[in-house]
């Protein structure tokens, strides 16, 4: 019995008690409003609406809990032990301040026990609606059973008397009808245990970060895929428009060429109309002349028994009796040389011929 009381006395001496009036004054100076007070649990709570932070001060033990929205764990309670007035001012100014003497509320059993041993050993979970006490904190109402998934898996939802809700491990709950005393474990062992549990928490958070990173990478990949798909669609659209433009250009050129061909055809028709499209003749070799005459003939020359005809294509034909010099000039004429465009013949082997390059030859 004496050893237990000695442990309690040592525990009380180790704790840093705060003056309640001073705590209220410091909180007011820092811009916080008092929202909860429990004289039995020796806890007073303050809230700063602008920051959404709740501060719980256990003034008899010098323990200060800050309730924050953790980016991955949701609402968490960060506790600092042995807090004096000066440190309390710093915590109120920066609730996330790391002091080196704190620990987070965790999913394993806390370093606290209840003086009523049978009640403290209760293993049956609290049901929704039951009253309970969060070890080292305050009385609450249980709002759910252990969750089966999510960031609060294995935890239960609780609601404090001021309406604030949190998620805690079931092993942190005990009956609220018995008086409890915080028993401080051996500092070295307690610090080692806290470090190991904090490491486990960080490892779990690292795994959650890995999953979230994979999700973010998947989202970024979708953006990259969409960006690549849009680029491919834009490139395909540019190609399609280029093909359309080329086709339109080709059709336009074809229309221009068709118009030019039509103009040339009409000019040919005009020329043919002016020079005539039919013949009436009594000639030597008339059958040869008749079979080779058509509307493309541009010139007909007669001389003696000979007939020569020039065509639009630059070719020509003649019958026998052509003047010898004219025959030599035209027979076997190379295609690279200008073709004749006009010819006439007279008696006594006389002739005149003009070529398309403007040069002429004659025998007179």
Image: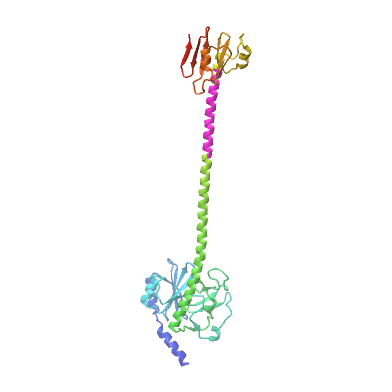
Q: How many marks?
A: 0
* Magenta run includes residue 254: yes
Near-viewer residue (161 or 298): 298
Q: Position of residue 220 (x, y in %)?
A: 50, 57
Image: 240 above or below 193? above
In the image, residue 276 sits, relative to residue 82, either above or below, namely: above
Q: Residue at x 51, y 46 (%)?
A: 235
Q: Is residue 237 above or below residue 84?
A: above
Q: Nearer the viewer, residue 45 or 70?
A: 70
Camera sees residue 189: yes
Does the magenta portion include 6? no
Up/down of 16 relative to 349, above or below: below
Coordinates of residue 282 in the picture (x, y in percent): 62, 8
Q: Residue at x 52, y 48 (%)?
A: 232
| Frontmost residue, 257 versus 163 | 257
Query: Residue reaching furthest top?
Result: 347
Residue 184: x and y in percent read 45, 83
Residue 180 is situated, as x and y percent measured from the top left of the image, at 49, 83
Q: Give the residue furthest to the left.
A: 86
Q: Which residues are magenta?
A: 243-270
């Amino acid at each position: 019995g004496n050893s237990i009381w000695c442990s309690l006395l040592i525990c009380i001496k180790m704790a840093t008690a705060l003056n309640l009036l001073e705590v209220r004054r410091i909180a007011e100076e820092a811009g916080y409003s008092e929202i909860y007070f429990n004289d039995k649990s020796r806890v007073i709570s303050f809230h700063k609406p602008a920051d959404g932070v709740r501060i719980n001060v256990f003034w008899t033990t010098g323990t200060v809990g800050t309730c924050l929205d953790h980016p991955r764990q949701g609402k968490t309670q960060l506790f600092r032990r042995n807090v004096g007035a000066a440190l309390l001012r710093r915590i109120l100014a920066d609730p996330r301040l790391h002091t080196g003497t704190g620990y987070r509320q965790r999913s394993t059993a806390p370093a606290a026990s209840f003086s009523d041993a049978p009640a403290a050993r209760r293993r049956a979970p609290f049901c929704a609606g039951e009253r309970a006490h969060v070890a080292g904190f305050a009385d609450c109402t249980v709002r759910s059973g252990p969750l089966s998934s999510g960031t609060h898996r294995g935890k239960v939802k609780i609601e404090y008397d001021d309406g604030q809700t949190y998620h805690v491990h079931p092993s942190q709950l005990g009956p609220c009808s018995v008086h409890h005393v915080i028993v401080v474990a051996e500092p070295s062992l307690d610090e080692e245990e806290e470090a190991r549990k904090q490491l486990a928490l960080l490892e779990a958070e690292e795994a959650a970060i890995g999953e979230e990173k994979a999700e973010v990478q998947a989202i970024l990949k979708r953006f990259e895929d969409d960006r690549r798909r849009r680029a491919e669609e834009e490139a395909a659209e540019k190609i399609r428009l280029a093909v359309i433009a080329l086709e339109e250009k080709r059709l336009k050129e074809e229309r221009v060429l068709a118009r030019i061909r039509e103009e040339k055809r009409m000019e040919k028709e005009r020329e043919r109309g002016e020079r005539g499209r039919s013949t009436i003749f009594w000639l030597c070799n008339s059958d040869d002349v008749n079979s080779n005459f058509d509307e493309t003939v541009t010139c007909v020359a007669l001389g003696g028994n000979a007939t020569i005809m020039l065509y639009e294509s630059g070719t020509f034909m003649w019958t026998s009796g052509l003047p010898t010099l004219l025959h030599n000039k035209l027979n076997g004429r190379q295609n690279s040389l200008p073709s004749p465009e006009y010819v006439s013949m007279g008696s006594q082997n006389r002739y005149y011929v003009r070529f398309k390059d403007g040069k002429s030859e004659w025998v007179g």
